Amino acid sequence: MPNMSLKKNPMPHQDPVVRAGNFQEVALGYTKEQAIDEAQRCLHCKNMPCVSGCPVMIHIPEFIAKVAEGDFEAAYQIIAQDSALPAVCGRVCPQETQCESKCVRGIKGEPVGIGRLERFVADWHNANATEKAVAPAPNGHKVAVIGSGPSGLTCAGDLARKGYEVTVFEALHLAGGVLVYGIPEFRLPKSIVQKEVDGLKELGVKIETNVVIGRSITIDELMEEMGFEAVFIGSGAGLPMFMHIPGENLKGVYSANEFLTRINLMKAYREGADTPIMDLKGKKVAVVGGGNVAMDAARCSKRLGAEVYVIYRRSEAELPARREEVEHAKEEGIIFKTLTNPVEILGYHNPDDRRDPKNGSVCGIKCVEMELGEPDASGRRRPIVKEGSEFDMEMDCVIMSLGTSPNPLIKSTTKGLEINKKGGIIVNEDGLTSREHVYAGGDAVTGAATVILAMGAGKTAAKAIDEQLKNK
Amino acid sequence: MYRIVKKRVLNPTVTMMEIEAPIVARKAEPGQFIILRVDENGERIPLTIAAYDREAGTVSIIYQIVGATTEKLNHKEEGEYIQDFVGPLGRATETEGLKRVAVVGGGVGTAIAYPVAKKLHDEGCHVDLIVGFRNKDLIILKEEFEAASTNLIIGTDDGSYGKKALVTELLQEQIDAGAKYDRVIAIGPVIMMKFVCELTKKYNIPTVVSMNPIMIDGTGMCGGCRLTVGGETKFACVDGPEFDGHQVDFDEAMSRGAMYRDFELHAREETCNLFKQEVK
C-alpha cells in the first residue's frame, strides 16, 4: 500500500540565518527513513510519465522501487545506467518542470520528490560503495571531448563505458566546467563534482587540463594529427552579455561569470585566497537579472556580508530562476526589486582630487519602474517603462547576470563549422555538426540552458558517435 | 605541472623564465599571452609571451615583481615546477605588409615588445625600436633589442644612459627627422601607451597597443578583461590583447586596473613576510 500523504517529505535545510553567513550546503539531504517513506509515495504507473519528463530518461519508478525496499545500491545502479552525474542532477536539475511535473501524485497534492530521492541514492553510493568502477576492454577507437562540463563529462562517461579511449580537453586548471566555476558550493559541493570526475578517470577517461581547443590545438589537428576519430564540442556558454548602459565598466561592476568564478573556482571567499574579490561586508549589491545564475550571485554576495537587491524588469511570476532558488534567496534576506530596470550605473567622482582611489567606483544605480504590457514573442508580457518613474539607489557593487553569448574561439578556428545567427553551433538530432565526425551539445549549441539538458545532449552525441564508429 | 628550465634575472625587479610547455610552444606567436598559476592556491595571472622555442618545447615569460603572485613566482628556481600554464591565448600581432614600424616599449613592457620587433625585423621590416627605462640599472635585453631592430633608441628618465627623455619625446624626434611609419606599436604602462597614442594621432599614424587588463579565465568566459574601444565593449582575451590605440579608452582602463590595488599591496606584504619567516 503506497504512502498516500499529499505532501513530499520536506527537505532538511540549514537555518536561513546561519547559512546566509557560510558557504556550506543549504539542503542537507534525506535520511534513510525519509527516503524510504518518500519512495513509498510512488504509484509505479504503468506508462511512467515521469520518465518522459527526464532528458536522459532515467528509469525512475524502478530506482524508486529499490529505494522503497531499502536496496540503495541497486537503486544507484539503475540510475547510473542513464545518468553519469546523479549526485549533481539530484541537486541542480529543475525537477519541478521535468520528471516531477509529470508525476501523477502531483495532480492532487505534491509530486514524488524524485530529485531528492536521486540525490539521496547518489550520496548513499558515494559514502558507502566500496567497489571501484572498472575500465572496460578498449575497443580501439579514440574520441576527443572538448570541455569538462556536464555535456562533456556525460559524453565521455558514456563512451568510456563502451570501451572508447576518451580524452577530455579542459581550458581551465580544474575539470567540471560550470559545475566548478559557476554553481556555488552551497548548492553543489565541489567535492561531489570531484567524485564524479574521479569516477570517470577510473573508467579510463583521460582529462587534459590547461588546453584551449581552438588556440593550443585545433579541431583539425585533433583529427588529422592526433588520431581522434570523432570530436564532441561541449565548450559551454561564452562571454557575458551587458546592457550597454552608461557605467558598466566602472570599478565594482562584475559580470555574474566573473563574480562567480572568483568565488567558486578561485575560492576568493576564503581567508588567505590569492584571488581577490571586492570586500562586500556592509556594502550594497545589486544583481541585475532573474535567472538561476542571478540567484547564485545574489546568495554569494549575501554570504560575503552584503545587503543584496535583485533587480528584474518583469514581475516575480516571470522570474526565470527555479522557484526553490527564489524562495531560498528570500529566506536569506535578499530583497527583490521586480518591475525595475537599470538605465545607468552611477560612478563616484571627486572633482577636487583626481587621485582619490574611489574615483571611478560604483556609487549607485539609476533605475526606472516597469509595467507589463502585451505578450511578446517569448509569450511573456512585455515590460514597458513607466514614464517619469526614474529613481536612484545607493550601491557599491553591481553584478550583471543577463546571460551569455557563445564563445567565438572554436568557430573561428574550425573551417566548415556552421553556426546560427546567435552564434550557437548548428547540429542535427544526433548532435552532428556541419563537419563530419564533429558533434556538439550543451550551451555551445543552445546558449545558456540547464545542466540536465547539456547532459542529455552529451548522451545523444555519445550514442551517435558509437553508432558511427563501432562498425568502422 | 610545468618545469622551469631557465631563470635569468634581468634587473633587480624583472626576471625571465623559460618554462617547459610544449603545447603552448607549438602555436605561440608574438603578441599572444599565457595564463599561469604558481601553486594550488594561486590566482590566475596573464603574462605576455616573450619568446618561444618550438623544438625545445619551451615558452619564455618576463615578469616584474609587483604583487603577491609575481613575488611567489620569483621564489621558484630552475628545475622547480609551477602549477598551471595555459596558452597561447589572444590574437597574434598582425605584421603582414608592414615596411617601417616604430615599436615603442616602456619598462617591463619592452620585454613584451621584443618578440614583436623581432618578428617584424625577421620579415624584413625596418624597425625603430624605442625603449625607455627609469635609469641605466634597469635596462634589460639590450643585446636582444639590438638584434631585433634596425635602429635601437634607448632613453632613461634620469639620463644615466642614452638620452634623458621619455619614449614619446624619442618618437617625436624620429617623426621630426622625417621617419614615415606605417604603424606604431606601443607596449608598456597604460599611461605611456596613452601618450604615445596622443602623439601619433596628431600625425595620423595607425597605432596598435597591447592591453593587459585584469583577467581570470583568459578564454572568453568571465568578461573581467573588458575595455572600451571605439565606444564599444571589447574583451582583451578574445578580441585582443592588441587594439587600435586611437580608439581605446585608456583612462577607464587605468581605473579598472587599480580595482584591487589595496588587496595587492597587502597580499604582497604578507607574502614577503612569509618568505622572510621561512628564511629564519
Image (cartoon, rainbow, N blue to C red):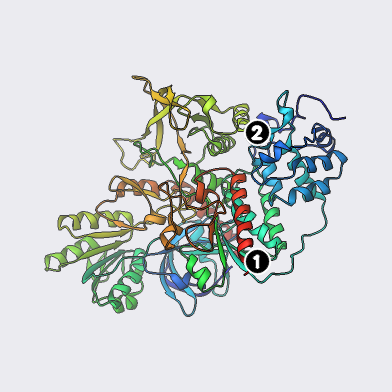
Q: Mark 2: few, some, or many residues within 10 Å (few <14, many ≥20)? A: some
Check disc 1: other Cα within 10 Å, few if <14, some if 14-19, many if 20+: few
- Going by the numbered disc 1, the residue's amino acid type is Lys
| Quadrant into which the N terminus of chain A falls | top right
Where is residue A134? Give x, y as percent.
77, 63
Residue A276 visible? The answer is no
- The residue closer to the viewer here, A441 or B245, is A441
* Mark 1 residue element: helix
Q: Which mark is residue A470?
A: 1
Count of numbered circles on the image = 2
The image quadrant of residue B206 is: bottom left
Query: Which residue is nearer to you in this view: A177 or A61?
Result: A61
Which of disc 2 and disc 1 is earlier in sequence?
Answer: 2
Query: In the rendered structure, which amino acid carries the disc numbered 2?
Result: Glu
In the rendered view, tell whether residue A293 sits above or below residue B264: above
Query: Of tags 1 and 2, which is closer to the observer?
Result: 1
On the rendered structure, is B244 left or right of B53? left
Element class at badge 2:
helix
Say which residue appears at 79% left-offset and 33% top-offset: A42
Which residue is nearer to you in this view: A201 or B261? A201
Q: CA distance from mark 1 to mark 2?
A: 37 Å
For image coordinates 82% across by 34% down, the residue present is A34
Vertically, is A337 above or below B109? above
Q: Position of residue A253 (x, y in %)?
A: 43, 40
Chain letter of mark 1 equals A
The quadrant of the image that shows the C terminus of chain A is bottom right
**Residue A295 position in % (x across, y down):** 56, 35
The numbered disc on residue A96 is 2
Q: Quadrant of residue B11?
A: bottom left
Callouts 1 and 2 on one subunit: yes
